[in-house]
Image: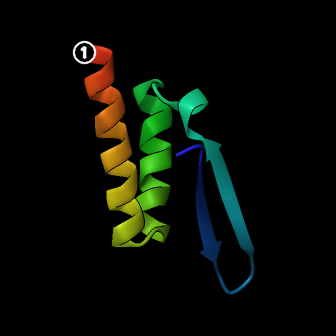
Amino acid sequence: MKKFRIEWHEKTTDGYLELIVDRFFPCIAEKSKKIFKLVAMYCSDETIDELQEYLEQKKSGYRM
């Protein structure tokens, strides 16, 4: 996963946030809380599962 895109569609505004995952993570807790809040609000369960799986793979790689 190179990029992760969060899209929102509100009554007054539409927008998106695109992360280059390998450059953003790992990050400090403050930044991750902001991102994960947006993920929970605007991403589908399938997209969340995909991101979680990717991050778990990266985490296991760091332990090695």
Rendering colour mode: rainbow
Residue occupying image coordinates x 49% and y 45%: 34
Closer-to-camera residue (21/57):
57
Residue occupying image coordinates x 37% and y 44%: 54
Residue at the extreme top of the image, as rendered: 64
Residue 5 picture quarter? bottom right
Image coordinates of residue 11 in percent, x first then y, are: 68, 87
Within 10 angstroms of label 1, few (less than 14), some, or many (20 or more) residues?
few
Closer-to-camera residue (41/12):
41
Closer-to-camera residue (7/50):
50
| Quarter that holds the C terminus | top left
Say what secondary structure mark 1 lies in: helix
Residue occupying image coordinates x 32% and y 17%: 62
Task: Please say if 59 is above or below 45.
Answer: above
The residue that label 1 is drawn on is 63
Residue at the extreme bottom of the image, as rendered: 11
Q: Is residue 63 left or right of residue 36?
A: left
Task: Please say if 18 is above or below 58.
Answer: below
Q: Is residue 61 left or right of residue 28?
A: left
- The amino acid beneath tag 1 is Arg
Say how many tags the image has. 1
Residue 33 picture quarter? top left
Task: Please say if 62 is above or below 13.
Answer: above
Closer-to-camera residue (42/59):
59
Q: Is residue 25 left or right of residue 54?
A: right
Task: Please say if 33 is above or below 49.
Answer: above
Image coordinates of residue 22 in percent, x first then y, are: 55, 31
